[in-house]
Amino acid sequence: MTAPAPDTGAARVAGLARIVGEALALTSGDARPEEAKEIRAITDAMVRLLIGTPLRSEGQLTIVSLATEAGLRRNKLTHKYTGLKDLFYALAKANGDRPGPAAESARTRRQQADLVRVRAERDELRAQTQLLARVVQVLEIENHRLKETNAVLQRHRTAQAGIPDLASRGRPTL
């Protein structure tokens, strides 16, 4: 893994995690090589999370994310490597409890994608609302015309009601 850029606060904090991890791995490496491997995995995961380049997790600065990033069970950090857990929390606090730029950019990309989707839905709903408003207006005009036509027909029928219909009377008998 390459060293993080030394000019950022997150990089300095990650460098400290790497140094402490290497020291712990060296001290336990001769007696228990499996522990040394786990310590290196945890400190490498710390570095990735602190500089914001997670490989296996969502990038949050939590023990769950750290365990996921290291490829270990959470209880390894909460029960066996409590010193590394405390170190991670201290380094995260020194980093301002914010993930590095890559995790923030991933979150930003998700938020921007959501924003694009929500804006598209809003535009679609606006278009549908305008269409429905036009349909309602046309129906109101047609309704008004039908009412006028009905009124004319009613007046015409009333006018015809006063005139006797001679054709329907039948023929007078002689």
Image (spheres, helix red, strand yellow):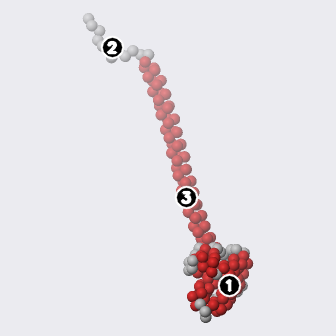
Residue at (43, 20) in percent of width and height: 160
Mark 1: amino acid: Ala
160 or 59: which is nearer to us?
Answer: 59
* Residue picked out by circle 1: 17
What label sits on residue 169 in the rendered view? 2
Instruction: Decide if residue 93 is on the left or right side of residue 169.
Output: right
Is residue 173 visible from the viewing direction of this image?
Answer: yes
Q: Is residue 103 something that shows in the picture?
A: no
Select label 3 or label 2 by which is in front.
3
Name the residue furthest left.
174
Label 2 element class:
loop
Q: Which residue is mark 3?
A: 121
Examine the rendered structure and indicate whether residue 104 appears above or below residue 44: above
Q: Which quarter of the figure has residue 116? A: bottom right
CA distance separating discs 3 and 2: 69 Å
Identify the image quadrant of residue 25.
Answer: bottom right
Asked whether the residues under the numbered discs 1 and 2 touch, taking CB atoms below 8 Å apart as contact, a structural biologist would say: no
Going by the numbered disc 2, the residue's amino acid type is Arg
- Say which element carries label 3: helix
User: On the rendered image, what quadrant is the N terminus found in?
Assistant: bottom right
* SS for callout 1: helix
Label 1 crowd bin: few (<14), some (14–19), many (20+), radius 10 Å: many
Q: Quadrant of the C terminus?
A: top left
Give whichever of discs 3 and 1 has the lower sequence position. Answer: 1
Q: Give the distance between the C-alpha atoms of the residues marked 3 and 1, in whole angstroms.
A: 45 Å
First along the sequence among labels 1 and 2: 1
Q: Position of residue 62 (x, y in %)?
A: 64, 74
51 or 56: which is nearer to us?
Answer: 56
